[in-house]
């Protein structure tokens, strides 16, 4: 058992809290951004924070927000009335509110040629029922229409991490006054605790979401400070958007609400996710766990005499927090949690583990009896986990009953998104007696399962991007159906399905599955063409290319060679269909000797990749060897990669890091943040692909394989 440090006295506790919360926020460093490397393809999952390990899924903050039933997504949260702007007073109030929070992204003035605009909110932290005056100074993105639309991702105290399931609604209209200024007034429902905002034209053809940051509103308490629920939901919203902002939010929570177990558990989790755990942080958390344990023990003793009990949520939270302290502390609180609060979300999770541990002994009946009882008591956020466990276990237990339908219906009651339906339909096919049902379900998904209703438009997503995401989801359903048909021996039907699925997009695994179906139906010409496309993908290894080559019959080798020669142009056509080219200022970067160099001077004839990077961003540092390897690969193809550090000049820490990493290529510096402003960048590592004319063809992505694919697509268009 790890020795426990003495609990700090109040003044020492205050000092540690201040040290934890005294953080300089740099919104341009979005830690963990590359884990969500497919954001522009609609992915919203963080593998390190799965449902069964999310320590914050069942937090409730009833003291901060009234118990209000959340409206349906199409129910108005606000009333809107345009009004004239009281410039000086509103601006001063907005600045004061932002300064009070200490973690909000700072606005910047609109300058000539700037892509995005500037939204000012007064107050930025409204109390319940308090109207908010909105002023928007439009940039180049939205032009100067008479009316713009204000949209928001509105969170209540009970919403989960990431964007999934959080409604995006229209708050109302902003009307143009003089020049590029727009104004309006909104009043949010009392259930609101946090909102992320964006402005768009009325056709949603263009959207300004502050470069992915989104502007923000937080609910204030009676003391004028952001409520615990508001900060908690801001941290949830930052998951996958900006891990550094999430950490800054949590540190602010520690400073304002140090007596909350949930706050310290948040901090412990963020430190773990961001590789910030040290012996010192472990000691702080051990001390806090001991303090909270003593508090709950005292309350339990007093409550026993008065006939009261400790709240289940507190037991669950302290158990989760104690898991990282030591085994004895963890086991003590787990035992107490399972005994005194068996329906708490964390208790349900532990009972799931205990139930599935019986499977090796073949006691499946008891397992399913336990799972059924857990479903009855589990909170909503754990129900999907219970249903998923049942469906995962089912193939091992036979599954030849009506049970799969029961559990699938339960899973759908929690999440009915097209992607989840595809997963459930595929699982249903694992039970032999339900294979046909699963296939029929996939077929329905290809026709009516994916649309603007089942896949709503996200905040910051324009209509074109939304349509493209819907199309990708429809193709994914077709590919899943094609695989199912091929597995069932219906090669002709599978080939027909893959033919439709592969008309657009770049999906090498689908191309290869199409080749399998084509070979099975005797359509060798199509199979060879598909294999040539797969072979062209730049991420493929030499070994994989050799394996593909071996599949082509000798008589078809000349046709295969011709298909390979045509494949780069096909890759270019498919990938560039998603390009959104825009001009950017020919901003300069600074080299290690202090000289300013324009991007046009660094750009090659074939294009350029600009990689924003930070030594203070853990994932960026971790990705540095891969970025350098990508730079070598693209450089050999005539596309330079410019590595730009988010600091004004080199320093000793940077020199040391570059020396340890054996970086031989130049590092450039974004002096004054000029380049980041020109690109509207928010995050590291973020890689932008520019064409040979200096236009941004693809916005920032932290997916290095996708960046290489995009650069290769541009290469095929050059003479």
Image (spheres, helix red, strand yellow):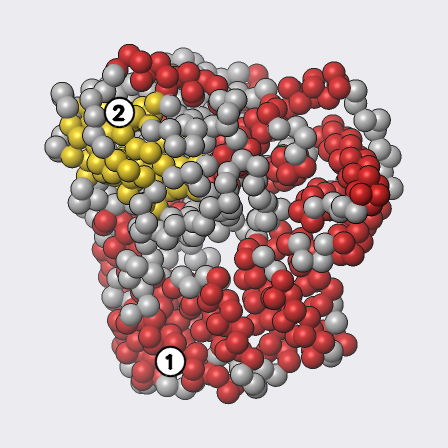
Q: On screen, 699 above or below 440?
A: above
* Left or right, residue 213 beside residue 389: left
* Left or right, residue 317 beside residue 217: right
Label 2 secondary element: strand
Q: Earlier in the sequence, mark 1 or mark 2?
A: 2
Question: Measuring 74% from the left and 78% from the top, which residue is drawn there?
Answer: 363
Q: Is residue 67 visible?
A: yes
Label 1 secondary element: helix
Residue 28 x/y as whole percent: 43, 28
Question: Measuring 59% from the left and 25% from the top, which residue is drawn there?
Answer: 256
Residue 135, which numbered label?
2
- Report the quarter where the N terminus lies: top right
Residue 106 x/y as whole percent: 40, 22
Task: Please state which of residues 245 and 303 is positioned toward the viewer in this rendering.
Answer: 303
Question: Measuring 26% from the left and 25% from the top, which residue is drawn there?
Answer: 135
**Mark 1 surroundings within 10 Å by alpha-carbon count, few (fewer than 14), some (14 through 19), many (20 or more):** some
Q: Which residue is mark 1?
A: 440
Spatial separation of the CA atoms under disc 1 and disc 2: 51 Å
Q: Is residue 695 visible?
A: no
Residue 715 x/y as whole percent: 27, 46
């Amino acid at each position: 058992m790890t020795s426990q440090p003495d609990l700090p006295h109040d003044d020492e506790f205050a000092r540690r809290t201040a040290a934890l919360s005294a953080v300089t926020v740099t919104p341009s460093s979005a830690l963990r951004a590359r884990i969500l490397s497919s954001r522009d393809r609609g992915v919203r999952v963080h593998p390190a924070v799965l449902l069964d390990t999310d320590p914050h899924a069942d937090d409730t903050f009833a003291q901060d927000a009234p118990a209000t039933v959340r409206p349906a997504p199409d129910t108005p949260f606000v009333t809107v009335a345009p009004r004239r702007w009281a410039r000086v007073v509103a601006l001063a109030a907005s600045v004061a509110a932002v300064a009070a929070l200490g973690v909000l992204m700072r606005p910047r003035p609109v300058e000539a040629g700037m892509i995005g605009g500037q939204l000012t909110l007064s107050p930025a932290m409204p109390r319940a029922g308090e109207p908010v005056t909105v002023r928007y100074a439009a940039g180049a993105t939205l032009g100067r229409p008479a009316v713009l639309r204000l949209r928001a991702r509105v969170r209540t105290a009970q919403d989960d991490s990431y964007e999934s399931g959080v409604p995006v609604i229209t708050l109302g209209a902003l009307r143009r006054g003089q020049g590029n200024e727009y104004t309006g007034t909104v009043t949010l429902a009392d259930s609101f605790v946090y909102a992320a905002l964006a402005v768009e034209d009325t056709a949603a053809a263009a959207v300004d979401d502050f470069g992915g940051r989104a502007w923000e509103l937080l609910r204030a308490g009676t003391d004028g400070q952001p409520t615990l629920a508001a900060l908690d939901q801001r941290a949830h919203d930052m998951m996958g958007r900006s891990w550094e902002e999430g950490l800054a939010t949590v540190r602010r929570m520690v400073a304002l609400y140090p007596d909350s177990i949930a706050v310290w558990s948040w901090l412990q989790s963020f430190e773990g996710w961001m590789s910030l755990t040290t012996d010192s942080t472990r000691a702080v958390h051990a001390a806090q766990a001991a303090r909270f344990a003593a508090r709950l023990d005292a309350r339990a003793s007093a409550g026993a005499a008065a006939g009261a009990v400790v709240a289940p949520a507190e037991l669950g939270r302290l158990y989760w927090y104690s898991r990282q302290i030591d085994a004895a502390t963890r086991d003590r609180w787990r035992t107490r949690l399972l005994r005194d609060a068996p329906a708490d979300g964390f208790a349900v999770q532990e009972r799931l583990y205990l139930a599935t541990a019986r499977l090796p002994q073949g006691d499946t009946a008891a397992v399913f009896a336990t799972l059924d009882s857990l479903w009855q008591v589990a909170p909503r956020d754990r129900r999907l986990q219970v249903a998923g466990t049942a469906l995962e276990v089912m193939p091992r237990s036979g599954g030849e009953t009506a049970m799969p339908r029961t559990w699938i219906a339960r899973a759908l009651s929690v999440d009915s998104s097209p992607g989840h339906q595809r997963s459930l339909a595929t699982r249903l096919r694992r039970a032999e007696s339900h294979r046909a049902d699963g296939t029929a379900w996939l077929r329905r998904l290809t026709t009516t399962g994916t649309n603007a209703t089942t896949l709503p438009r996200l905040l910051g997503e324009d209509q074109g991007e939304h349509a493209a995401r819907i199309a990708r989801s429809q193709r994914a359903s077709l590919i899943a159906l094609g695989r199912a048909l091929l597995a069932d021996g219906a090669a002709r039907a599978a080939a027909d399905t893959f033919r439709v699925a592969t008309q657009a997009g770049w999906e090498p695994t689908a191309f290869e599955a199409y080749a399998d179906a084509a070979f099975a139906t005797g359509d060798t010409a199509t199979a060879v063409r598909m294999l040539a496309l797969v072979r062209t993908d730049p991420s493929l290894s030499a070994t994989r290319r050799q394996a593909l080559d071996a599949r082509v019959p000798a008589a078809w080798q000349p046709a295969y060679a011709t298909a390979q020669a045509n494949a780069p142009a096909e890759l270019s056509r498919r990938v560039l269909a998603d390009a959104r080219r825009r001009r950017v200022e020919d901003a300069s970067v600074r080299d290690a000797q202090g000289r300013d160099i324009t991007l046009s001077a660094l750009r090659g004839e074939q294009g350029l990749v600009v990689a924003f990077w930070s030594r203070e961003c853990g994932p960026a540092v971790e990705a540095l060897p891969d970025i350098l390897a990508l730079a070598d690969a693209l450089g050999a193809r005539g596309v330079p990669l410019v590595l730009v550090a988010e600091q004004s000049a080199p320093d000793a820490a940077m020199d040391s890091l570059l020396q340890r990493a054996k970086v031989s290529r130049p590092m450039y510096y974004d002096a004054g943040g000029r380049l980041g402003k020109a690109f509207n960048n928010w995050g590291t590592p973020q890689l932008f692909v520019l064409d040979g004319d200096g236009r941004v063809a693809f916005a920032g992505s932290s997916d290095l394989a996708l960046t290489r694919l995009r650069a290769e697509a541009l290469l095929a268009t050059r003479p």
